Amino acid sequence: MILRQVLREGTRALRDAGIAGPERDARLLLAEVLGLSVSRMTLEPDHPVSASEAKTFHGYLARRGAREPVSRILGRRLFWGRPFEVTPDVLDPRPETESLIDAVLKGPKPERFIDLGCGSGIIAVTLLAEWPTAKGLACDVSQPCLTVTKRNAKTHGVQDRLTAVQSDWFSNIEGGFDLILSNPPYITEEEMAHLDPDVALHDPHLALTPGGDGLSPYRILATGTAEHLNAGGQIAVEIGWKQGPDVAQIFKEASLIDVNVLQDMDGRDRVVFARKPE
């Protein structure tokens, strides 16, 4: 068989399985099997596909049809233009988190920052790659997450400026930081019942929700700024799109100033910034 035939069949299979964007996903999966870039596939529609390659592709299609995300199948996710390893132990990075990166890069460059609940390390590693002189600390309660973070740091050449610490929020953290960052679990207990299967079946539950109203991590983060955020330093967190006013109020009650809620590319509240008084 040839590429265009196999791709057509794969697209049809995913469409029949109810997958949104079936052609895109089929193209990504087939490109992986054939060792081609996605852009090359359009230029080589008659590229031969062996029986073993077709078998591997059909296996990928079956997994995607069962609602396993493409990034989980491939074991990586592109984020801020860089590939990051993802495993079953870590949250699959979302494009919305790039709103946090974009907002932080527009502000002052810190000498030292901390990423709390680092997961795969996308936030800390991305910022260290963008800030060649900064130093970062990435912490997570999960040791497997820290292992993935360290591999991603090595992949992108920032391992010498990143310290990974196992910690339940600030419990094992010492010292102060110019910038505190977090994409914490924020999905409410009620929202968990309505999650897309791609998320609910494959992301670690601990990385998705703290239970209840979803706001408990922000209360912990706000309290931690008293000891760990340097005077004049900033805190920036990702939020659920309905949580802007509540998180802003939590930060104000912690005596933080210049509290600002920023929107993502879809115009939904996504990031809350605040600053500690000088």
Image (spheres, rainbow, N blue to C red):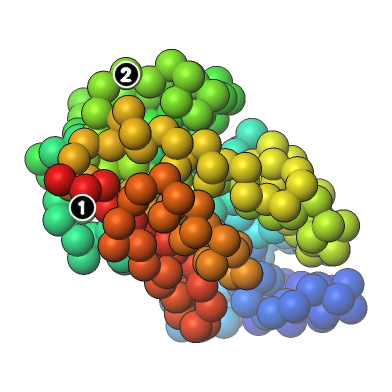
Task: Return the residue found at the far left.
Answer: 133
Look at the image and tell me whether residue 172 can be seen. yes
Q: Position of residue 12 (x, y in %)?
A: 82, 80
Which amino acid type corresponds to the residue marked 2 in the rendered image?
Glu
Quarter of the rendering occupied by the N terminus: bottom right
Residue 244's mark?
Answer: none
Q: Secondary structure at mark 2?
A: loop
Q: Secondary structure at mark 1?
A: helix
User: Which residue does the numbered mark 2 point to in the structure image?
Assistant: 174
Q: Position of residue 262 (x, y in %)?
A: 40, 72
State how far apart marks 1 and 2 are (Cα). 25 Å
- In screen coordinates, is 149 left or right of 10? left
Quadrant assignment, res 165: top left
Residue drawn at (74%, 78%) of the image: 20
Tell me which numbered mark, 1 or 2, is placed earlier along the sequence: 1
Residue drawn at (68%, 50%) of the image: 214
Judging depth in this view, the residue of 225 and 54 nearest the camera is 225
Q: Position of residue 236 (x, y in %)?
A: 37, 53
Which amino acid type corresponds to the residue marked 1 in the rendered image?
Glu
Up/down of 226 relative to 218, above or below: above
Judging depth in this view, the residue of 185 and 95 nearest the camera is 185
Mark 1 or 2: in front is: 2
User: Which residue does the numbered mark 1 point to in the structure image?
Assistant: 130
Q: Position of residue 29 (x, y in %)?
A: 64, 62
